[in-house]
């Protein structure tokens, strides 16, 4: 299943070991993460076993995992904690070795097993939440009743151990969980239902509202179990959060990847307040570009607007050595300024964005809709003690109506203005 079963290429520097670094791992106290951030940095994706391995490496005692799994009435398996070396990094590993054949279990069966277990209530609640996320995803994919969902692979004893063990580890740390954007694999994977496309359908269902991106390889980067754990317990997706790192844990997956180490990193840290906001109601972000094509500049403007900029403009300039250039500027509200600056750096060749605070005087604005022979058209009305109101039909709406009726757009604009004048809107009413 996923990282547990997916194949990989051999690599000279990847080895499995037993507890060689045990003396270097310091256990953390229960509740160490209270008021802190626990960040799962997953450039190679994640699975249930990787999450447990990473949190054990961070300092969760192995006994916390083992005792939690032993509290559930399942048998025919044993747990194994060890280490693997990936690109010179010694990471913890976690494996569930199945000794006896296991039955396929429905969601109702798994829920009953966990509900009747001896798990502490907070851990039980987390485990039930994880399996519910997974069951809901599978039910949507297979159009099945929730209780009748057959988990197949994910209902096997190894997945129950992963879900219960991760619930116990997350409860032990008790931090605000964030996860990096997750890579999605390509290709196909063999499952009990047959050949499934990657990413698996249940993974996509679980990760609704979480950030994902193309992982660039034919590999199951994120397993259904891993996706369900994230969906049940992570507050949000995040690039590296603003925090002061305190502890780091590394967990290794089973497969060896040709282009990246198969590692998951967990970072526990205290949140850090952002720098004080610049004085002013808005911020102007600017950058100089002497190597931007017209296409690149247009795409950058579109991306910056998508991040919430109120206005974006490009002004011609001359830079050092007499090079013609553009100054790309964007006006944003304070709370959107960081996103706008990040978009500028991401979408252009710039290596820096300068910022300065501004304040602006604004006309109070409202939008009204007027009826015309071409349909309802929104009108923007800007008023205030600054003379007659400014009245302007929304051009995109006028253009759409003009195309729908096969008339020039100026006719729609004129009709909208006439309707606004007739009902008093053009006079500020």
Image (tube, helix red, strand yellow):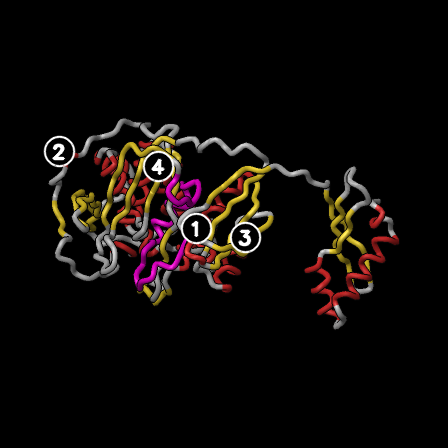
Q: Is residue 237 magenta?
A: yes
Q: Is residue 213 magenta?
A: yes
Q: CA distance from mark 4 to mark 2?
A: 24 Å
Residue position for label 1? 345
**Residue 113 appears at what percent x and percent y?**
34, 42
In what quadrant of the picture does the C terminus appear?
top right
136, above or below 219, in the image: above
Residue position for label 4? 38
Does the CB distance between marks 3 and 4 fall below 8 Å?
no
Which is more N-terminal, label 1 or label 4? 4
Q: Which mark is residue 23?
A: 2
Q: CA distance from mark 3 to mark 4?
A: 29 Å
Name the side, left or right, on which 330 lies relative to 245: right
Q: Quadrant of residue 24?
A: top left
**Residue 420 appears at what percent x and percent y?**
83, 53
Nearest-to-viewer mark from 3 and 4: 3
**Residue 165 appears at what percent x and percent y?**
29, 40
Q: CA distance from mark 3 to mark 1?
A: 14 Å
Name the side, left or right, on which 218 lies relative to 82: right
Query: Which segment is the magenta one?
Result: 212-241
Can I make out residue 169 in this image? yes
In the depicted view, which residue is nearer to us: 376 or 352? 352
Q: CA distance from mark 4 to mark 1?
A: 27 Å
Nearest-to-viewer mark from 3 and 1: 1
Does the CB distance between marks 4 and 2 fall below 8 Å?
no
| Circle 2 SS class | helix
In what quadrant of the picture does the N terminus appear?
bottom left
Residue position for label 3? 306
Q: How many marks?
A: 4
| Circle 1 SS class | helix
């Amino acid at each position: 299943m996923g990282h547990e079963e997916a194949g990989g290429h051999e690599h000279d520097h990847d080895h499995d070991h037993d507890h060689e670094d045990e003396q270097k791992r310091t256990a953390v106290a229960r509740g160490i993460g209270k008021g802190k951030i626990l960040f799962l940095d997953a450039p190679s994706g994640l699975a249930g076993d990787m999450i447990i391995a990473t949190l054990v490496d961070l300092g969760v005692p192995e006994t916390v995992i083992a005792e939690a799994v032993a509290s559930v009435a399942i048998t025919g398996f044993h747990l194994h904690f060890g280490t693997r070396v990936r690109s010179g990094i010694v990471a913890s590993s976690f494996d569930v070795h199945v000794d006896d054949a296991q039955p396929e279990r429905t969601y109702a069966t798994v829920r009953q097993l966990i509900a009747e277990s001896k798990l502490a209530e907070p851990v039980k609640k987390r485990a039930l939440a994880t399996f519910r996320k997974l069951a809901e995803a599978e039910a949507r994919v297979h159009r099945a009743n929730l209780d009748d969902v057959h988990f197949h692979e994910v209902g096997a004893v190894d997945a129950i151990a992963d879900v219960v063990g991760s619930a116990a580890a997350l409860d032990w740390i008790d931090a605000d969980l964030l996860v990096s954007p997750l890579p999605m694999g390509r290709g196909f994977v063999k499952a009990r239902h047959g050949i499934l496309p990657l990413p698996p359908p249940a993974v996509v269902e679980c990760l609704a509202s979480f950030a994902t991106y193309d992982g660039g390889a034919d590999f199951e980067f994120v397993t259904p179990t891993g996706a369900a754990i994230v969906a049940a317990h992570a507050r949000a997706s995040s690039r590296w959060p603003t925090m002061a790192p305190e502890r780091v844990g590394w967990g290794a997956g089973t497969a060896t990847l040709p282009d990246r180490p198969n590692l998951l990193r967990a970072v526990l840290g205290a949140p850090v307040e952002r720098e004080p906001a610049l004085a002013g109601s808005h911020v102007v972000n600017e950058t100089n570009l002497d190597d931007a094509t017209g296409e690149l500049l247009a795409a950058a403007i579109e991306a910056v607007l998508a991040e919430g900029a109120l206005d974006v403009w490009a002004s011609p300039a001359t830079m050092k050595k007499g090079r013609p250039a553009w100054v790309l500027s964007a006006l944003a509200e304070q709370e959107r300024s960081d996103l706008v600056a990040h978009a500028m750096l991401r979408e252009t060749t710039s290596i820096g964005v300068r910022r300065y605070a501004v304040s602006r005087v604004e006309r109070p604005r409202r939008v009204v809709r007027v009826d015309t022979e071409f349909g309802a058209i929104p009108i923007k009305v800007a008023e205030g003690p600054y003379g007659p109101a400014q009245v302007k039909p929304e051009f995109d709406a006028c253009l759409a109506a003009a195309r729908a009726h096969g008339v020039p757009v100026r006719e729609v604009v004129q009709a909208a203005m006439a309707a606004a004048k007739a009902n008093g809107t053009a006079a500020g009413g």
